[in-house]
Amino acid sequence: MGAEAGERRRLARAWSAEAGPAALRERRGLRDPGFSREEADWLMGRLQRSDASRFLSYRLHDERNDDYSLYLNGWVGGFYAHLDARSCEVCCLGECVHLADEAYRVGISRDAAYGEVVYAGPISGRTHEEILDLVFEVVRVFAGATDAFHEETRPAWKWRESDFGDFGDCIYDVYVRNAHTGPYRRTLANITFHVNCDTEWKDWPWEGPWEVELG
């Protein structure tokens, strides 16, 4: 029997708040081994339970072993999280945030990463659960976004020369606009997300609220 006219129901797969493979808390870094399908499922389930879920759709695609793409706004919506053995990335509205393993990160030139955002905090020593926590937070920031752009600050000489490094001296300010939250800021190591902060407070000192620095 179908639902009566005018009756709205939400159907979702049940996920325990503690669900997730044990490897989430045992595996460290990205390179050996990469993420499992179960871990990618766990991230999707956590997003489905979150306050951002109403802005997201979910389609998990296996690219190859240890390589998964979670499309969050349809196949061609431009909002997705990608997990592989070198880097996780979250892309939305043309902004792309890379959470790369240190061994891979040092091989990325600043020129190659021009126009993108590269996280400089620790990855290799973190558990897979902690790495997916970072992915989760970035997705939440972008969920429901109507516009996004970023500014990058780096030493002046590094704008003139191709350079390889860990991006620790690159500071990114990512500005996100949406219609469903008040203004707030969130910092992950060298990246600060400014949500709804670039209009009313553009020329004023920031007075809050701040969210915890997750680094």
Image (cartoon, rainbow, N blue to C red):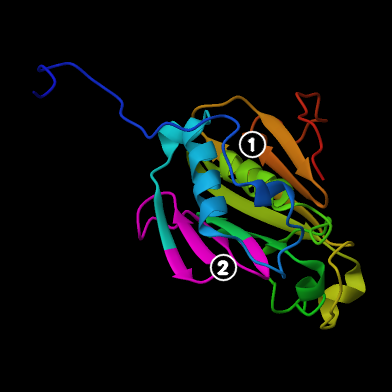
Q: Position of residue 128 (x, y in %)?
A: 70, 53
Vertical relation: 159 (above or below) 148: below
Q: How many neighbours does mark 2 have within 10 angstroms: few (below 14), some (14-19), or many (20 or more)? A: some
Q: Nearer the viewer, residue 61 or 16?
A: 16
Q: Is residue 115 visible?
A: no
Q: Position of residue 100 (x, y in %)?
A: 72, 65
Vertical relation: 181 (above or below) 107: above
Q: In the rendered structure, which segment of residues is drawn in magenta?
A: 62-88
Q: Nearer the viewer, residue 175 or 130?
A: 130
Which disc number belongs to residue 98?
none
Vertical relation: 111 (above or below) 191: below
Report the residue marked by disc 1.
Answer: 195
Which quadrant of the view contains residue 195? top right
Q: Identify which residue is drawn at 47% across, 54% down.
A: 79
User: Is 55 within the magenta?
Assistant: no
Which quadrant of the view contains residue 55? top left
User: Marks 1 and 2: CB-CB under 8 Å?
Assistant: no
Residue extending farthest to the bottom is: 162
